[in-house]
Amino acid sequence: MNESWRDRWVFGGKSRNGAPKQVPGRPKYRWAVAEVPTPRLEGEGGKGFSCGLEKGYSDQMNEDGVSKSSRSTGPHRFEMEGWISCAPFERLLNMRIVEAADGRAVLTMPFHMEYAQGGGLMHGGALVSLADTAVVMAIKSIVPPQSHFATVLLEAKFLAPVKQGTVTARARVVHREGRVIMGHAEVCDEAGRVVVDFSSTFKVARDAAIRGITFQKGGA
């Protein structure tokens, strides 16, 4: 790796030399691993590693070289299409709700390159996110709109790798007692092979109403 390339690697929206990034003519997005000093990791030279999403067009940055899309770290306020619809993170992963009713849900997610791990397989975190979200939609189909609940426990068994195609998660609510709701999901590849067996436990908040998020329909 030559130094001129390393100097253009991005961490926090700036080049390592601190100047606003100007890299004309590159692809819009590139993944890079930037070597950066960090007090949280111990090792030679006190350096650790951080993954960065390099945006190749300078108009994606503000005048300080900071990504326009990452300036805010919350709390966030946003609008959703409805009570049963994809949140920002789920849209980031291109999840699609096929159906959600009567305590059951089916969701799909394509294997885009951005979801790959270092070995070229679909990242386990993406698969777990799909399974967890499928259970969420199954729960949403049986609780009052704007009920505030969250995952408190989950278990995932990875049974086979995903190398291509679109994966499908089928979820159902298996038990409910008081504020505790339990769900199960299977994630299958395009051949119908189960690649992840997933179970999770959710808890409904005592102050159960979601605040700060606007739902256009079915929970506005």
Image: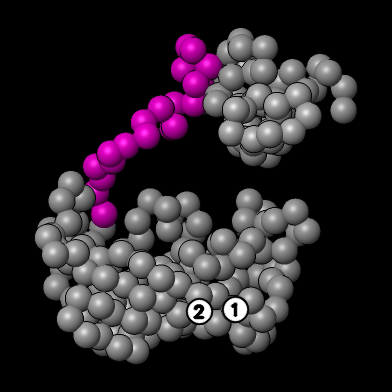
Q: Residue at x 49, y 26 (%)?
A: 67
* Crowd around label 1: few <14 · some 14–19 · many ≥20 (10 Å): few
Q: Could you tell me residue 196's position as x and y percent?
A: 59, 78
Q: Quadrant of the N terminus?
A: top right
Within 10 Å of disc 2 (Cα), the crowding (few <14, some 14-19, many 20+) is many
- Residue at the (80%, 22%) spot, across then down: 5
Q: What type is the residue that disc 1 sits on? A: Lys
- Residue in the picture at 66% in, 81% down: 159
Marks 2 and 1, how far apart in space? 6 Å
Q: What mark, if any, has residue 157 been given in the picture?
A: 1
Magenta range is 61-80
Check residue 29 in the rendering and tell me which mark sits there, or answer none: none
Mark 2 and 1 residues: CB-CB less than 8 Å, in contact? yes
Would you place residue 201 above or below residue 54 in this image? Answer: below
Classify mark 1: helix, strand or loop.
strand
Residue 145 magenta-highlighted: no
> Residue 198: which disc?
2
Q: Is residue 187 left or right of residue 24?
A: left
